[in-house]
Image (cartoon, rainbow, N blue to C red):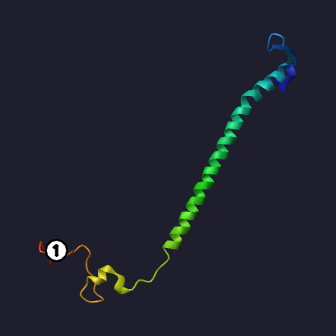
Amino acid sequence: MIFAIYNWQPVELTLWQNLVLETKVPVLALLAFLAGFLPMWALHRSVVWSQNRRIRALEASLKNAAMVRQRDTQPTTVTGVDNPVEKAATTPGQTVDPFDAPLVNTEGSASQ
């Protein structure tokens, strides 16, 4: 406001040879400010909009992945017969150490 009050003087701005713009200094300063500010503001808003769209898409995919994981991790009933560790055991309640694998001979018979 102080700049506008003390510089309220007419200026002539020659745009082209036959076109002259006569305006006040504060109006010219405001137009110059808007000419630099508006494109950058529009660019900023478009980047924010794009990033918000990307964030919403990533959040939706994360939510869907969590829903699938939650559905897949619900407990299922497993019988003792379907357990491969118990199948290799000699008795039904006995389990076999998975790191203690039987050795295989070249003839194809297993030995321990």
- SS state under label 1: strand
Image location of residue 10, percent across then percent down: 87, 15
Question: Residue, x 64% and y 42% (percent of image)?
Answer: 47
Can residue 66 be spotted in the picture? yes
33 lies above or below 75? above
How far from the left and from the top, in percent, is residue 111? 14, 78
Can you say which quadrant of the picture contains the C terminus?
bottom left
> Is residue 111 among what the camera can see?
no
Q: Quadrant of residue 22?
A: top right
Residue 88: percent from left, percent from top: 26, 82
Check disc 1: other Cα within 10 Å, few if <14, some if 14-19, many if 20+: few
Amino acid type of the residue that numbered disc 1 sits on in the rendered structure: Leu
Indicate the quadrant where residue 8 lies: top right
Could you tell me which residue is drawn at 58 percent across and 55 percent down?
Answer: 58
Where is 58 relative to 36, above or below?
A: below
**Residue labelled with disc 1:** 103
